[in-house]
Image: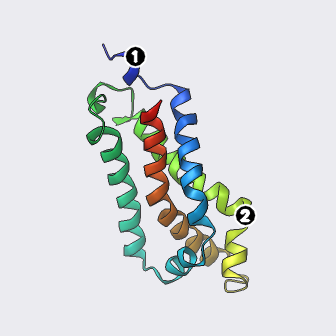
Amino acid sequence: MVGRQSRYAVADTFQQAVGGFLIAGPFVVTQEVWDLAVNMAWYQAAVTAFLVLIIGYAALYRADDNRDPDREAEVGGVPLRFLSLISVSYLSVLVLALAFDAPGTFLGGQFAGDVRGLAWVTLKAVSVGSVFSVIGAATADSLF
């Protein structure tokens, strides 16, 4: 049986969200992140998304000896805590980006009428912010 400290609970998601939002804020509101996103190729975006997964997994299960991914609740063979962490990491950045109107502010009319282009650049910027947000979310999850 898994010890009480290593069981996933909804409270863990809220702890992850606090860490994710705290770290995500500064990356959502910088021109540099949006410039990077505009200039990233699809394969760079894929590598960035892969980095979020690797960093998240390492932060949860390699940096913290109290957790064993094989002993946690799973969804489709993936630990629920990990799914929560990745979701929180991306969603915290996306929510802040949209709340602050970062795409409109930093991209201006660059993608006027091109909703797909704007969405693609926003997704890339969210991935860049998530590289850092995942660290904050994982840290907050392991602190409490």
Relative height, residue 109 to residue 72 (above, below): below
Q: Residue 116: give x, y in percent of width and height.
A: 62, 74
Amino acid type assigned to the residue bearing label 2 in the image = Phe
Q: Residue 141: give x, y in percent of width and height.
A: 46, 36
- The residue lying furthest to the front in this view is 143
Picture disc at residue 127: none
Report the Cα–Cα distance between label 1 and label 2.
38 Å
Relative height, residue 118 to residue 96 (above, below): below
Q: Quadrant of residue 67?
A: top left
Tag 2 residue: 100
Tag 1 residue: 4
Q: Quadrant of residue 42?
A: bottom left
* Helix, strand or loop status at disc 2: loop
Alpha-carbon neighbours of circle 2 within 10 Å: few (<14), some, or many (≥20)? Answer: some
Which coloring applies here?
A: rainbow
Relative height, residue 72 to residue 46 (above, below): above
Which mark is first along the chain, 2 or 1?
Answer: 1
13 and 113: which is toward the camera: 13
Q: Is residue 97 visible?
A: yes
Q: Residue 113: give x, y in percent of width and height.
A: 73, 82
